[in-house]
Amino acid sequence: MRLDEFVELERNERAERRRLAERKDYAILDHVETFQDRFEESLSGDSLVGSVSPSIFVGRAEYPNVSTGILSPVGREDRADAFRTSGAWYEEGVSIADVFERRTSLLNSNRTTAADSVHDAWDGWLGTQREVAIADRPVDVEIGLDSTPDLDLDVDRGDLGAPVGPSARAREASLGENPHVPRPVKKTLEDDDWRAQGAMTYLYRRGFDVYDINSILSAGALGRGDDRRLVPTRWSITAVDDTIGQYLRGTIRDAQSVDRVEIHRNEYLGNAFWVILAPGRWEYELVEMKAPGSVWNPDPEAGTYLAAAHEGREGRTAYVEETAGAYYAARLGALEHLSDRGRQAKVLVLRHVSDEYWGPVGVWQVRESVRDAFEGEHGTAETFGDAVRGVTDHLPISLGDLRRKSTMAAGLQTDLSSFLRDSDATT
């Protein structure tokens, strides 16, 4: 399919998705008004609270003394699984307001714990938290609180912080049932000589998605015996994406290349992704364009903010600072596609963050958007340069701007029209 035909098809689908999303976003106001009443009805002061927990949270402030929390959807226990971050959110088509509502509805009952005190912790608070993390479905728990949670949810659509729910210090926690733990997870738990990277890869090959593996790693349930640690949730997300990405890169290292230039596209929650695959040995780059007025570039008078990170055939040895977790999440989606096809390629991902992205929802939307970009129709081009030039016509920056920021686009020759666009932008 020619690029212009592909773009027109995608434009119609995007318009419909935006229409559906906009109908949901203002529900955030109703949620804030009703949440406190529902929360207070579900608690009895600081007495034991019976609930259902779909997930855990480990903070990173003051590491290695971390806040370890059990998350519970207050008043929504009957659909607790919907509150666990996963690819199902993308399939459901949740809006930014939906994400806000789900995350602010989770009570984070927490205690401060040393990150390295978890090797044989199967009793008490840490034991309960670990059982929640390794179970394959939400777990019945009873939690004793030291105080009434802070219910200050004074928020609006301009808030830039990631949405979080109320937090309360916990006194104790216990299981209300025997959680079901999948056999492969039990295997990784019982093997004290298995390094965390190998255990993560094993679980992925057994059909566990990165969301499941992330929770298990965060709870300190993977790795060699005394080396097991609680891993802050934000760190564990990137660690799993990176580890599985390295494994997948190895599966295509000696594979044949794709035989033509492909252009894939997807848009979700105000983020547009263009993924260009070109013949050649593995190479990858993510370029982010953050529009004025978007969540990470809030000044409406500022220009488009550019960030980029790149790797060659051997990958990277240092953490990506500019594009952070989005780099690893997008790379994972591209590598999964190539590994499924048994092919390697040069991969350029261009992410345009528009001003419709008014609140951060997490890198899961990057991962799922790139994963889904490979479904359905795609565009083609004669050369990598043709693809980049064609896509740039739909971006908020000029080809010259892209070439100055992007390692992969830097070698492209600038044509006369691009030169004129750059000249106009500076006059």
Image (cartoon, grey):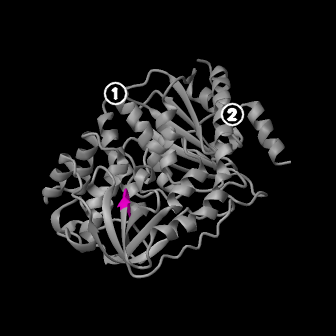
**From mark 2 to mark 1, how far is it between C-alphas?**
34 Å
Residue placed furthest toward the top: 1
Where is residue 315 shown, x and y percent of the image?
38, 47
Q: In which quarter of the image is residue 44?
A: bottom left
- Magenta residues, dominant SS class: strand
Q: Residue 342 carries which label?
A: 1
Q: What element carries label 1?
A: loop
Q: Mark 2 points at which residue?
A: 15
**What residue range appears in magenta?**
52-57
From this view, report whether residue 232 is shown above or below residue 353. below
Question: Visible in this render: residue 28?
Answer: yes
Could you tell whether 239 is left or right of 121 in the image? right
Q: Tell me which amino acid carries mark 2.
A: Ala
Q: Which residue is drawn at 67% across and 29% down?
A: 11
- At a point 46% along the width and 27% down the height, the residue shown is 279
Give the class, few, some or many, for how many residues have Cα within 10 Å of label 1's Cα (few <14, many ≥20): some
The mark nearer the N terminus, 2 or 1, is 2
